Amino acid sequence: MSKRWVVLLLVTVLATAGLASAAPSWRPSRPITVIVPWPAGGSTDMTARVLASQMERFLGQRIVIVNTPGAGGAIGMKEAWDRPRDGYTWAANSSTAVISYPVLGQLEVTHRDWLYFYVLYAPNVIAVPANSPFRTAKDLADAMRARPGAVRVSSAGAGSSGHLGAETFRLVVGATYRHVAYAGGAPAVVAAVQGEVEAVMQLSMEVAEMLRAGRLRALAVMSRSPLTMEGYGVIPPISQVFPNFPETGSYFGLMVPKDMPADIVAAVEAAFRPASEAPAVRLFARQNGVVAVSLSGRQATEVTEQKARRVAWTLFEAGLAKKTPTELGIPRP
């Protein structure tokens, strides 16, 4: 064998060994359960389903979505936390909800006890029934000031993304409203469509379908930039009316306990990366007015920690906190 062929053979062997060592050592041998602690049709549920469908291809196993609603998502998250650390049970949720549970006294587990695999970022959208007299966010704020505590706003429950959006709106505009809680984002949106409430401030992907159908009308997106939603149009940023309004939205994806074995975490990461960048995910984002992201590891931890400052202190300033952010070691934003 020539010297050249010996070198080529050695390079091939080393490359193959490198790929083998980089491959995760854990592979699932049966279906994986993802607990969605909200009803079907909401932001968490939709995100979990689109991401799971892509990750299955890389894991070689089915991922079964199980909806376990109740207590603003705390019941399902507690169930996911209590399951064995064998890699066969994950959770799906929003950054906002996970941060809020200990602040509201619903769970002892904090946002620092999870590892995150975020695939989407969704801003809050202020939407009203199609026949509403409100044409702008200022109209809604004026009505809240004129009728303190009377304007009904639905959400997925205390501490949810929609509730945080409504509380942020209340604090910024200096008004009060009547909070009407539902079991999840989807029923909260349906309540607005049916006229049970006068406004909903859930996330973009939860209101997208009803906006396109003409059943709801968007007043503003809680952002500094306009939001273009396919099939609907451009939603103006709330900063046009209230310049100091903070960016309000949530990251969505999968979560596993931080003490999950490293080889299992590596396998989740290996499947998550290509799945999060799949064309199906990009299409879903474009159609639903959300931003496709691919955040895990340190990046995901850092954005969650930054989000915790805004969420925890907003809940505290709204008088809803059972534990202060200071008690939880969360500094002011």
Image (spheres, helix red, strand yellow):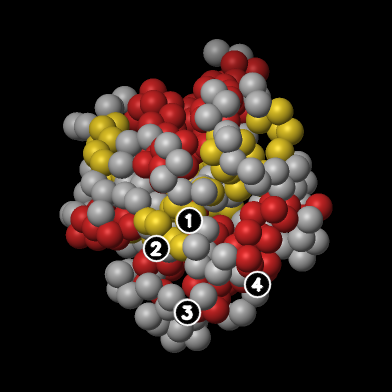
Cα distance in 3D space between marks 3 and 4: 14 Å
Residue type marked 1: Arg
Could you say whether the residue bearing mark 2 is in a helix, strand or loop? loop
In the picture shown, does residue 6 fall above or below 234? above
In percent of width and height, residue 219 lies at: 67, 44
On residue 158, which mark appears? Answer: 2
Q: Earlier in the sequence, mark 3 or mark 4?
A: 4
Say what amino acid the circle numbered 3 marks: Gly
Q: Which mark is residue 174?
A: 4
Question: Which mark is first along the chain, 4 or 2?
Answer: 2
Q: How many marks?
A: 4
Between the C-alphas of marks 1 and 3, the distance is 19 Å
Mark 1: few/some/many CA within 10 Å (<14, 14-19, 20+): some
Cβ atoms at labels 3 and 2 below 8 Å apart? no
Q: CA distance from mark 3 to mark 2?
A: 12 Å
> Residue 193: x percent and y percent?
47, 36
Q: Residues within 10 Å of mark 3 (few under 14, many from 20)?
A: few
The x and y percentages for residue 192 are 47, 42
Residue named by callout 3:
319
